[in-house]
Structure formats: C-alpha cells, structure tokens
Amino acid sequence: MSAHVAVDGLTITFGEPGQQRAAVDDVTLKITQGATFGIVGESGSGKSTLARALLGHTRPGARVARGHVDLGGTDVFALHGKALRTFRGRSAAMVPQNPLSSLTPHCTIRQQLLELITLHTPLRGEAALRRVRELMDRTGLPDPAALQRRYPHELSGGQRQRVVIASVLVAKPSLIVLDEPTTALDKTVEARVLALVTEVAAEIGATLVYVSHDLNVVGAICEHVAVMKDGRLVEEGKTRAIFADPRAPYTRRLVEAIPILKAAPPPPTGHPPQTVLAAEAVTFQYRRRGVFKRGGPAVLNNVSFQLCVGETLGLVGESGSGKSTLASLIAGAVSGHSGTIRLQDAVLAGPARQRARALRRRVQMVFQDPLSSLNPAQTVGEIVGRPARLYFGDTAAQAHKKSVALLAELDLPAELLTRRPRELSGGQQQRVAVARALAADPDVLICDEVTSALDVTVQASLIALLKRLQRERGIACLFISHDLAVVSDIAHRIMVLERGEVRDYGPRDQVIASPETAYTKMLLDAFRATQALRQERAREALAS
Amino acid sequence: MAVEALPARVPSRLREALISPLTAIGVTLVAIHLVLALFSPWIAPYSVSAIFTDGLTPPSAEHWLGTDQIGRDYLSRLMSGGRVALLVSAVGAAVAVLVGTLLGLMAGYLGGLIDDAIMRVTDAVMAVPELVLIAILVLTFGKDIAALSVIVAIVYTPGVVRVVRAKTASLAALDYVRAAELRGEPIPRILLMEIAPNLGGLLAVELAIRMSSAILKISALSFLGLGISQPTPDWGLMVQEAMSVVFTDPWFLILPAAALSSLIIGINFAVDGLARAYGISAKGTR
C-alpha cells in the first residue's frame, strides 16, 4: 500500500540563530493509508512537535530547518492561508491533550458543532441540526437533546473529549492526530475513549496517529509504533515486534518500565506484624460555609484499615475517590473527621499545628508535584536540612552532615546541596522531596501520587528506591496512586476506594486474584489486557 | 553513584534581562541620576544658593546655563534639583514596601478577620485620590524631608499591600507551604522564610514603580507650593519659577522638565526589564 503520510528528513529547531536546539532531528517515516500509528516518547522527546508538523503547524519560535511532510501528495509546509485552513479539518484533524482549551468556552456544544458543519459541509438548517444529533449519538454522548445546550465547562473530562472527537468527525478527515488525548482522564474513562477513537477511525477509513508517553496505551491500539528520544527516531516498526524484541536499549528500558502487574514485593520484615497506623470507621465531609451549615456529601465514608511496621498499603482510586483527603486527614492538612486514626498509642486528630511536635515528626508526606513541593527560593541543603533542625534541634553543621548522608542514601550527588529545585531534573526533585521526609526519621511515610508527574523510566527507579529504603529502614508506607500497576509493584496490601467508600481491602495477591467488587475488576482488566497482549506477542516472536 | 548527570545551572534571569537595550538605557539613566543626587555638591561648579548676578543672564563661560531670576548658577541648581525628591521617594517607597509586604503577607496567608481588617483600612486609604490625600497629609504633618517621607510611605503602602496579598494567597496554596504547615513551622517562619523569599522580584518591581510615581507626585506638590520649598533646588519648583518667563526664556521650563522626565523614563525602562526577568506584568501593578 502506498504511503499516506511521508515525513522526510524533518528537522525542527527552537531558539535564536546560533544557539538552536533541534526538537525534531532528522526524522524520516512513512505511514500507510488507514494505519494506526503510535509515536512514543518521554516529555521533551519531540513527539508533540512532530505530531503538530503533520498538520503543517509549528509552535511560535519553532522553525522547519530541513525536510518536508507529505500528506496524500500535498506538501503541508507549502500551504498557506485559506488552503492551509481547508487542509486542516478536511484532510487532517487533531485531538489535543486538554479538551477544555480546544472548545470555545462561551459557545454551547451545539454551536461549536454547527459552526464546523457549516464550514466543512454543505448541510444547513434542519439537516445540520440532524447531523449534530447523529455525531453526538455516534460518540456516545448521553442525552444529546440536553447536552447540546450545555457549555464546555458543564461537561465532564470524558464528555469534553468526546465532543472534540465528534468535531473531528464532521469533515471526515483522512488523518487524525491525537496528542495524549487521555492523559487528563481516569483509567476507566480512558479505556472507553480509546475504544471510541479506534472505532470511528476505522469507520471513516482515516489514518490514526497517536502520540503518547504511555507505551501501554499505544501498544493496545496501534499496529505500528515509533519511539522518539531527544528529537530522534530511536526505533520504528510493528508494535508486536517491538514489544517482543525491542532493539534499541532505550526502547528496551521503556518496554521494561511498562506498568504491568508484577511479582509481589518481598514481605515486610519484623515478626510478628506490629500495627503502626490504624484507621477506624473514618468518615469525613467538607463543611459548607454559609447560612445553612449543612454538611456536603461525604468524601470518606466509614473507612478502616491497618498499616504495619515495614509494610506498604496501596491506596487506589480515581480522582474524587477521597484517597488524597484520607492522606490529608492523617497528615493533619484537613481536620474534622469522625472515627479514629491512631498512630501506635497516640490519636491523630485536629490540624497539624495543634498536634505535638513529636507526633508530627512521625508522619511525613511526599507530594505529587515535586517542583511545587520544594521551595524555589531555598537550596536543596536548606530544604533537606530543615526537618533535622526543627525536630531534633540540630545545629547547621549537624543538619548538613545528615543531609550529605541522606543524599548519598538516595543515590544523589552531594553537589546538589547548593542547587535550587528548578536546577534539578524531575526525578532528582522527587528524590529530594523523599529525602526531606526521611530527614524527620518518620514511622509512617505518606506518598501521594509521587510517581504520576514523572516519566516512566524515572518512575520505575523511584519505586525501586522506595522499596529499598523501606527494607533498610522498616518504614510503614501509605502509597496512594490512581495506577493499580504501580501500586501492585510496591504494596503488600491494597485498598480500593470509590467515591469515599472502601470497595476492596486485603493482601495484595488476594485483591488482584479475586477482587470483591466489579469496580476493582474493571481497574484490573485494563492491565490484564495489555499483559496478555504482551505475553501473546512474546510467544509469537519465539515461535517465528 | 549518581542516577543521572547533573543538569546545567540555569543562567541568572537578571543578567539576561539587562542585555536588552531599553533596560540598559534605563539603568544608565538611573545611574547618572544617582551619581548626581549623591555627589552634586562636589561635582557642581558653584554652590546652589550663592548669588552671582542681579537676575536672569544668558549662558556664559562662567555660568554655562546662565543664572536664574535671583542670580544663582542655573547649572548647579539643575544638577541638584532631584536630590530631595529622590531621597524622600526612596525612603518613603522603601518604608511602604517593607510595611506593605508585612501586612500583605499576614492578610494573604492568615485570611479571616485579620485579612478583613487590613484590607478595609487599605480600601479606605485608596478611596481618597492620591494628590488630595497628600495635600491633606502635608497640611497635617508639614513639609520637611522627614514628614514628606512619612507621607510617601502612607500613600503607597496600600497598593503594596494589595499586590503582596494577592501573590501571597497564590503562593500559600503551593505544596511547599503545605509541607511547612504539616511540619508545624511557626507562622512567622512560614511567612518570612517560605513565602517572602519568593516575592523577591515582585518587591523589587514594586519599589521601583512606587519610587517613580512618588518622584512625580513630589514634583507636582512642589510646583503647587505644597512640597519642597525655597531655597532648596527642586525640578518641580524650578518649573513653577519658570512659569513667569516661559515665553521669553523657555529653557527654564524645558530643562528641569527634561531632567525629571529622564529620571522617570530611566526608572520605568529599568523596571520593565526587571519585571520581564521575573515574569511579572509591570502594568498590573502600576
């Protein structure tokens, strides 16, 4: 079959003349008509820049230094003005990462779709309105009559992305480029949106280019995949072949870092198990301000669990499940729950400020976004040394000595002590945040989505580090994540939360092997599917 | 063993900003004015109050810009004309930024009743037009250098409070402040060690903007006879003196006005560079 999209020696540079940096560096690839093609890479690999170039678009400040992109016989960079606008939409369309920013906030869903229909098709009046309803039905949007009149902000994230997909379908383009369309969505919503995308692309016979950092997702929907690193194409080929036998060392690292349900972590040391943190029937609701001070809906409802010394409890749930609220209650960022939370013999209640200093020291937290949790005005030395000075009354020299030792323990170079957070890589920042928590020598470490802001390879090394630290220090860890695969790698026990209620709670293997509720099963199925795919591909590769 | 290579140090944003030509012009103008303000008594050819002639004389070899209506050397007076205004506005603006920052930090971080109390007083002061407020305060406190400095501080504190409060509220939502709260850091430490250092660029911009505004206001006051008074040389005062001879000897109006403008323009160019360096919109705070 002939190539539908042909990229030839494409180089796109950023920056002033003289000190240019190539975001896309000499990339050549061909995509056949109707194929599903994945472009995978970590942040900064140039995958989004390449994807935009397929539509003849470059970000401000970017320059096409060499090469061209040919789509169905058209040189996309030769297009200007009206020809380019017609080309985008009719021949090629894009589904961006954040659907909210690609929908006009002051137009209803109907207006947005109608505008595109009048622009790209001869349909008018009643026929156009019928097409709006068809599109909404096709993309699985509920209750089209009512939803048409809503504004983008009144829709859920998954619904917004469906509207964007509906608008892409208007002109039936021959190429659909999706740039991380599901990163902002929960796992269960993601699965449904992905299914929709592949279905409609097949229906209109469009070529699908899917850009993602998530090899897992790409493996599930794409036949071909290209792996990018630092602007260069590292490897390209059939997805099956790459999964089964990655050639480039970088691809191998990516494939190995795919979160799959791994073998159980070694059991916690220390016998008999000694409970360090216990929650009993914890219920919490945010108080509403105003004249009628009724409580809001329960964020947590009757949550109980136990955490033993040297053990990790994985807390899994999607956004709005209450998992972060539970962490905040334990750490003392919010207060006012009913039920009890106990740290050994002491009761944890009230805001952190009202708790005894010794009690505060024993519970430490690591946050999701490492850059926001480290003060940009302080050096790493000040950040990591602070807990020792606050809790143990150390002198500056003593605190410095402890910081040096801690950094060494976390495989960080001691030169980092004089650096400020923004001079560090994401992985280093998160390690510094872990070091700050460990400087307090806590009994319980709360990790709130600590891996979700990191690239997959960095993620894997942070998890390995946390496991090692736990083994060496015997810390109890409450590990919160939306990602069941990451949790299965580190947790000894798993608790699944949905809308504030415990759906599943038990030893890791029991929850994974025989989940009690349909909700947990659904979360697990997503990972099982990719895992089965991988095993099947590995077998095929061996057989051939 | 290190996990990954150490990333390169991020270059100073300040140094980058100073490379821009407009910023360089601004910084140069400000530097010239600062040197004149600090050292004019030693640089100027004559004393500012010595009388040489009976009245106006044209430029000559002895007096390069001639003499004024009462026979004083005009060049010397022009060189010293910004001293008092600069001093008063620098001291006043510095006090306003200091006090405004402390109040803004408390209002923005603590919220509740303290926030309400600080902000309502601030609103009340800001509701009075600046020039009217200054005039009332001059009539109350007098117009010596100390009183004028206090007046500048009073007039400019509320604006600083507003800006710092808004920034504080947005910083307080960040995880590093939450981390400090969970550690149980005392409130003054959170305000001064966690939040205040991150206001750095904003405060520098605030200081400069308030200063340039204060210099203009003081000159206006002197022009109206409410500010700096004779025999102290002052550009505002010199413009006022020039009003009677503006049609015969216009340079008496043009020269002090140009001196004043060059200082204000210099500060504003420098501030724009500073604001760009710290990613602050200078327009929003003006």
Image (cartoon, coloured by chain):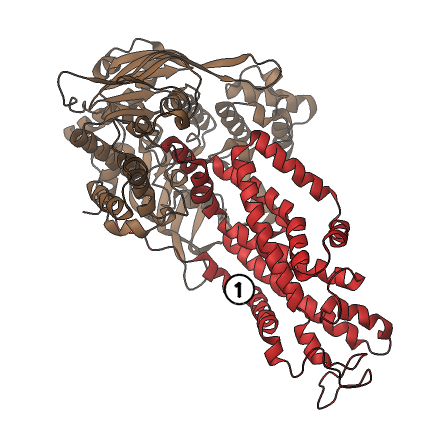
Chain colours: A brown, B red
Quarter of image, res B85: bottom right
Please provide percent x and percent y for residue B160: 60, 47
Quadrant of the frame with the C terminus of chain A: top left
Q: Could you tell me which residue is drawn at 27 percent across and 17 percent down?
A: A345
Query: Height in image: A87 above or below A346?
Result: below
Residue A370 vs residue B89, the one in the foreground: B89
Please provide percent x and percent y for residue B210: 63, 54
Query: Height in image: B102 above or below A515?
Result: below
For this orientation, the residue located farthest to the left is A271
Residue A268, can we see it?
yes
Q: Is residue B203 left or right of residue B44?
A: left
Please provide percent x and percent y for residue B199: 50, 47
Query: Height in image: A305 above or below A532?
Result: above
Amino acid at circle 1: Ser
Quarter of image, res B204: bottom right
Please provide percent x and percent y for residue A334: 43, 23
Q: Is residue B82 left or right of residue A538?
A: right
Residue A13 vs residue A462, the one in the foreground: A462
Q: Is residue A498 left or right of residue B19?
A: left
Residue A87, can we see it?
no
Q: Helix or strand or loop: what does disc 1 sit on?
A: loop
Question: Which of the chains bears the disc numbered 1?
Answer: B
Residue B177 vs residue A69, the one in the foreground: B177
Q: Could you tell me which residue is drawn at 76 percent across and 71 percent down?
A: B238
Q: Which residue is mark 1?
A: B20
Total marks shown come to: 1
Q: Could you tell me which residue is drawn at 75 percent across and 52 percent down?
A: B131
Residue A417 vs residue A33, the one in the foreground: A417
Query: Height in image: A118 above or below B264?
Result: above
Q: Is residue B50 left or right of residue A281?
A: right
Quadrant of the frame with the N terminus of chain A: top left
Crowd tier of the residue under label 1, counting other residues whose Cα lies within 10 Å: few below 14, some 14–19, many 20 or above: few
